[in-house]
Amino acid sequence: MKQERDASNEEEPNKEVEWQEELLDVIHNMSPAGFERLVQRLLRESGFIHVEVTGRTGDGWIDGQGILRLGGLISFNVIFQCKKWKNAVGANQIRDFRGAMVGRADKGLFITMGTFTKEAIKEATRDGAPAIDLVDGDQLVEKLKQLSLGVITKKIEIEQVQIDPDWYANI
């Protein structure tokens, strides 16, 4: 009987899907417009004001814009690009986005469900060019969790029982 239990326990860990992967799958199944609205909500909840989605086919690499207000004293005009890609975003996409943002915003924000290549990360912070902030899939799901946007976090206390042998010895 013990052998049967051990065999079934070996299969258990494979059934469990990490919440991050599950959330990325849910987001991947959203429409592109839905993903842009999700990013709009995320930015609003993160302190942006006047966030609007402008993305559509042929949007010239601009999916939306907003104003990030810091401490009530200073603000930045930010444009953003959303890519529902599972694969890595490369340096060419960062260059194309930067070309679209020049003269239109103080900052750029590129959000993807996937990752960024090393070259893309380097390009985003290249000397002499406007910096572009990058948000990959891992950062995206963590921020959604932090802001409780479609993610419910339950904290469950685990009861720990500790025996005090001295107490019993003194009875």
Image (cartoon, helix red, strand yellow):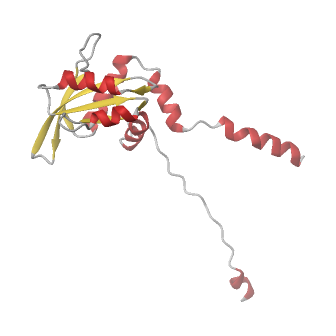
Where residue 9 sits, quadrant-wise, is top right
Is 32 positioned to the left or the right of 6 in the image?
A: left
Q: Nearer the viewer, residue 54 or 124?
A: 124
Instruction: Name the quarter where the C terminus is drawn.
Output: bottom right
Relative to 138, 98 lies left or right:
left
At 37% from the left and 17% from the top, the residue drawn is: 32
Give the percent coordinates (x, y) of residue 156. 54, 52
Q: Can you tell which quarter of the image residue 111 is in?
A: top left
Give coordinates of residue 162: x percent, y percent: 66, 71
Q: Residue at x 32, y 29 (%)?
A: 39
Figure check: 73 above or below 95? below
* Residue 37 in view: no
Residue at x 52%, y 33% (from the top left corner): 21
Q: Position of residue 114 (x, y in %)?
A: 43, 29
Residue furthest to the right in view is 1
On the image, the x and y values in percent for residue 128 come to 17, 36
